[in-house]
Image: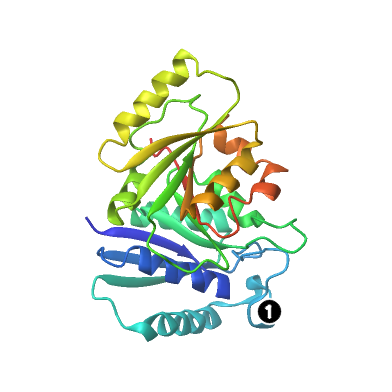
């Protein structure tokens, strides 16, 4: 089945990097890429407080100028050759960011959103831009893959999946994690940061459920203890040179603890690793 991928762009270097990552990630899959730019006052930018393409605020770019920027973007992406499996559509929307994204998802049955985001800044105060967090938290029916600004593509061979085993997962929630792992023959490393010496019965049941859900993909289970969650995840990623970290966004679950301040500032998912936020598509 063809993949339908939504790429958010503010025509910045970060957004271009995310687009290149997406094209490489789905290199061998027949895919349609939908490039969306919103030029409403809250329009998408990597860092909504500081970024202004071509010396202008993103919301001052009118549609003719946006069309020209789209043309230049597609020309840049095509410099390394055209992939016959890929097709492209561009969408300039005078809409609020979330409404624009929801509209494209509904009209085109989008499979996944891929967007750029800032890496760790020198002040360590900006990790996710507000627009990235808004998309992660408020788009409930589509997974989001956020690509840090300095991450070039390499085929993912190891995906870290942190969990506390407190909530049972559904097959549909993990669909795109498994899909990416299978596309690139990657292994999933389930990581548990221990809060107590033993898992309770509910946690053991949920761990067994994950074992069944991951039966068709390489996977293993790992534990760390006596370490803060964000430190444990970053240490694990660093020690193994992992490629992606994935979370499921459910209310009152592990992900909500990760993206809530101040953890998001310290974790930053990891400044050199993309983060995949999975959703329950109902």
- Residue pointed to by mark 1: 56
Q: Residues within 10 Å of mark 1 (few under 14, many from 20)?
A: few
Quadrant, the C terminus: top left
Point 29% across, 64% down: residue: 31
Can you give x and y, in whole percent of width and height, for residue 132 in the image? 59, 55
Instruction: Answer with the quarter of the image where residue 41 lies.
Output: bottom right
On screen, 246 above or below 97? above
Viewed as shown, does residue 130 lie left or right of 141? right
Can you give x and y, in whole percent of width and height, for residue 70 in the image? 47, 79
Can you give x and y, in whole percent of width and height, for residue 5 in the image? 37, 60
Quadrant, the N terminus: bottom left
On screen, 26 above or below 260? below
Asked whether residue 93 is in view, the answer is no
Extreme-top residue of the structure: 201
Mark 1 element type? loop
- Looking at the picture, tell me which residue is in the foreground, 16 or 196: 196
Instruction: Answer with the quarter of the image where residue 252 lies.
Output: top right
Point 43% across, 19% down: residue: 204
Viewed as shown, does residue 278 lie left or right of 253? left
On screen, 102 above or below 150? above
- Looking at the picture, tell me which residue is in the foreground, 248 or 238: 238
Can you give x and y, in whole percent of width and height, for residue 137 in the image? 56, 44
Instruction: Answer with the quarter of the image where residue 40 lies.
Output: bottom right
Point 66% across, 54% down: residue: 130
Point 30% across, 58% down: residue: 3
């Amino acid at each position: 089945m063809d993949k339908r991928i939504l790429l958010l762009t503010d025509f910045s270097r970060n957004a271009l990097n995310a687009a290149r990552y997406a094209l490489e990630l789905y290199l061998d899959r027949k895919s349609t890429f939908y490039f969306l730019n919103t030029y409403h006052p809250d329009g998408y930018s990597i860092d909504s407080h500081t970024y202004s393409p071509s010396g202008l605020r993103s919301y001052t770019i009118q549609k003719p100028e946006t069309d020209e920027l789209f043309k230049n973007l597609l020309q840049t992406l095509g410099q390394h050759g055209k992939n016959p499996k890929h097709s492209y559509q561009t969408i300039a929307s005078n809409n609020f960011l979330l409404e624009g994204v929801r509209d494209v998802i509904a009209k085109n049955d989008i499979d996944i959103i891929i967007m750029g985001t800032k890496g760790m800044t020198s002040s360590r105060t900006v990790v996710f831009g507000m627009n990235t967090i808004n998309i992660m938290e408020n788009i409930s029916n589509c997974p989001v893959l956020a690509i840090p600004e300095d991450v070039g593509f390499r085929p993912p061979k190891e995906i870290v999946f942190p969990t506390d085993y407190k909530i049972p997962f559904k097959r549909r929630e993990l669909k795109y994690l498994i899909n990416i792992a299978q596309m690139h023959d990657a292994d999933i490393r389930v990581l548990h940061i221990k809060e107590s010496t033993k898992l309770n019965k509910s946690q053991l049941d949920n761990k067994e459920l994950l074992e069944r859900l991951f039966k068709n993909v390489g996977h293993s289970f790992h534990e760390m203890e006596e370490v803060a969650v964000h430190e444990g995840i970053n240490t694990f990623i660093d020690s193994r040179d992992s490629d992606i970290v994935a979370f499921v966004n459910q209310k009152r679950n592990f992900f909500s603890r990760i993206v809530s301040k101040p953890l998001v500032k310290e974790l930053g998912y990891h400044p050199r690793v993309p983060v995949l936020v999975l959703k329950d598509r109902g």
